[in-house]
Image: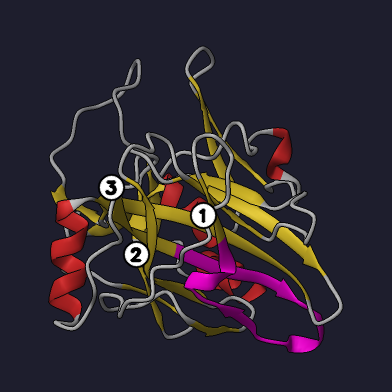
Amino acid sequence: MGNVKKKLVAGAVLCSVFVTGAFAGGTAINATMRPDIKVNVDGSTKTFYDAKGTQVYPISYNNTTYLPIRAIGGLMGKTVGWDEATQTISLDTPSSNNAATYSRTNPAPVGTQQTVKITGYISNYTATLTVVDVDRGDSAWEKIKAANQFNSKPDDGMEYILAKIKATVVATEDDKAVDFSNYSFDVYSATNVEYSAFAAVVKPSPEFSGKVYKDGTLEGYAVFMVDKTDTAPKIVYGASYDGSGGIWFSLSK
């Protein structure tokens, strides 16, 4: 993330921090949302989301372009907090152990970024992951069917979940690339039973699949198949062979 931080400092005049909300003593302004303005970091176009997973855009005011504070925090690899009582914004380095906040019994809500530190025989790396959005049932199936006419319907009693996932590699050992895919995740039911059936379908584009080096970001679609009656399915990334560790995400809005 070193290059990102340098670029943010160098571009401070162009991209100032913009905080939305009505603050005591604040001044009302008329600003213009600019979805036409793209933000490139090291040649990669970045997409920004609010805490609920809704895409947000740069804002223009008085010939200056502003980015939401959460967007700046994401580029810096920081978590963004808001203290209503003191009217204070905080940007903190995320802990490598998110299990203290989110877990198997309390998976991270859609739109929540988590950090994971993987230590293994093949590679050691730190990455942030977010389930940006989820679609389920008939709506998900229509999009999957449109991706490839030969995609199969879900098994009897089951339905598809189409999840948009974003992963950023924060650090790697010996400049190794990290390989992400749909199969990087294990899927569990609300009753904590692992689903054995994988959704072997052609995913809508862009697919969540590819190798990523440090400071790179991959964003795309993954598909999971769950029981129609499952009210709270979830996925885990980076769990050990015995099921311990990893970061957990809810697949329910």
* Amino acid at dot 1: Tyr
If the image is split into quadrants, where does the N terminus sit?
A: bottom right
Residue 67 visible in the snapshot: no
Q: Is residue 169 magenta?
A: yes
Q: Which mark is residue 150?
A: none
Q: Write the residue at 77% across / 49% down.
A: 244
| Residue 197 at x, y percent in the picture | 46, 63
- Mark 2 → mark 3, Cα distance in angstroms: 10 Å
When the figure is inspected, residue 28 is found, relative to residue 73, above or below; the finding is above
* Among the two numbered marks 1 and 2 on one chain, the one whose residue lies closer to the N terminus: 2
Q: Secondary structure at mark 2?
A: loop
Q: Which residue is mark 3?
A: 54
The residue to which callout 1 is attached is: 195
In this image, 23 relative to 235: left or right? left
* Image: magenta residue range: 166-185
Q: Position of residue 119 (x, y in %)?
A: 83, 67
The answer for how far apart the CA atoms under marks 1 and 2 are is: 31 Å
Q: Say which amino acid is labelled 2.
A: Thr
